[in-house]
Image: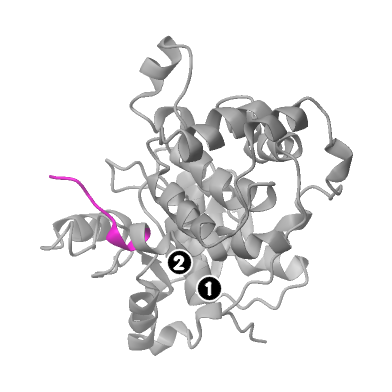
Amino acid sequence: MGLNLNLSASLNVFKLITRPYLCLPHYTVPTFADLPIPLDSVLKEQGKKADIRAVVLDKDDCFASPDSNEARSNSIFKERFEDLKRAYPGRRLLIVSNTAGATSWDPQRKLAEAVEKETGIPVLGHSDKKPGCGSEVMEYFRQYPETGVTHPSHVAIVGDRLTTDIMMANMMGAWGFWVKDGVVPLSRKSIHQKVDEEMGGKSWSKEEEDYFWVHIIPFSHVRRGPHLAHPEQSFAQLGRKMQDAFGSLARRSYTGVCLAEEHYYKNVVEGRISKHAPEYVKAYKALAASDPRQPPSIARVRRELNGLGEATHPATKPGAEMDWELGGREETE
């Protein structure tokens, strides 16, 4: 097969520049085996009015390896998969994949049929790939009233990708459950990793780029447009925040130097764009073009990294800047 291009993700990623909350999950679990059942139990514990009646599952790297159609051959994974099927029987559990069932990749539904046979769960046929197929998901549930789904807030989206699964959940007004680690360890997701390590460094992964452009740049002193309303933080502060977010999955030390000089300036100023950054850099430059401010000098960044001016950045509680009001979802009783 050829390249599995995702035009929907490429177009929708630009929404993150002005609406970064679209890729924020409502709940995060390390692996598929850690999903709470029922899913809305943890949301209710947080005081949220959640009534999840159906669950949409990603396949690749969520509960199965990309080259497999069955739940990971691990007793805990299989047990949790069966628990989900019991909690959300029949049409209340649906697989939505950007491979199996996607008409651009699986036009004859051969992959979809194989997954359905292996799992016993229906696979959605959809013309738009995630994150753009939310309307097709809702149309499916409308066809089966026995699911009880009458509003997107009755649906939970479970997946391992922030910019496809979780972004679709927020765009359609559903609940997003992020499987952070996936089936394939982060260290094995890039075919270039061994080469990178032998060369003395590691290229930035898609997950790192997503986090950097959505959760770092909009709060740094190089933020632009609507992000100027955010309290400014130094790259040193933001580096610690990113280090905490990735924890044991961090592929490098996210120091202020790493984020500012080695990544932001390399991509934006020098034009040496990383593999997974082109769409973000293009969107950032478009936003910056309408901003009359001059880009900050490298001298300012170096002064900041040396500890000068650190007190000018208001202290914030870790994660406080991520306390977004998610738009588009009307929570139901």
Relative to 38, residue 213 above or below: above
Residue at horizontal 47%, vertical 84%?
149
- Quadrant containing the C terminus is bottom right
Q: Earlier in the sequence, mark 2 or mark 1?
A: 2
Q: Which residue is mark 2?
A: 168
Q: Magenta stretch: residue 159 in it?
A: no
The stretch of residues the image draws in magenta is 1-9
- Whole-percent x, y for residue 221 in the image: 69, 47
Q: Relative to 302, is 312 on the left or the right?
A: right
**Residue 103 image position (x, y, % from top left):** 18, 65
Quadrant including the N terminus: top left
- Could you tell me how far apart the alpha carbons at marks 2 and 1 are, in whole angstroms? 8 Å
Identify residue type, mark 1: Ala
Mark 2 neighbour density, 10 Å: few (under 14) some (14–19) many (20 or more): many
State yes or no: discs 2 and 1 in contact (Cβ < 8 Å).
Answer: yes
Give the residue type at disc 2.
Met
Whether residue 214 can be seen here: yes
Displayed quadrant of residue 22: bottom right
Magenta residue check for 7: yes
| Residue 158 at x, y percent in the picture | 49, 59
Seen from the viewer's position, the closer of residues 216 and 139 is: 216
Q: Find residue 174 and name its label.
A: 1
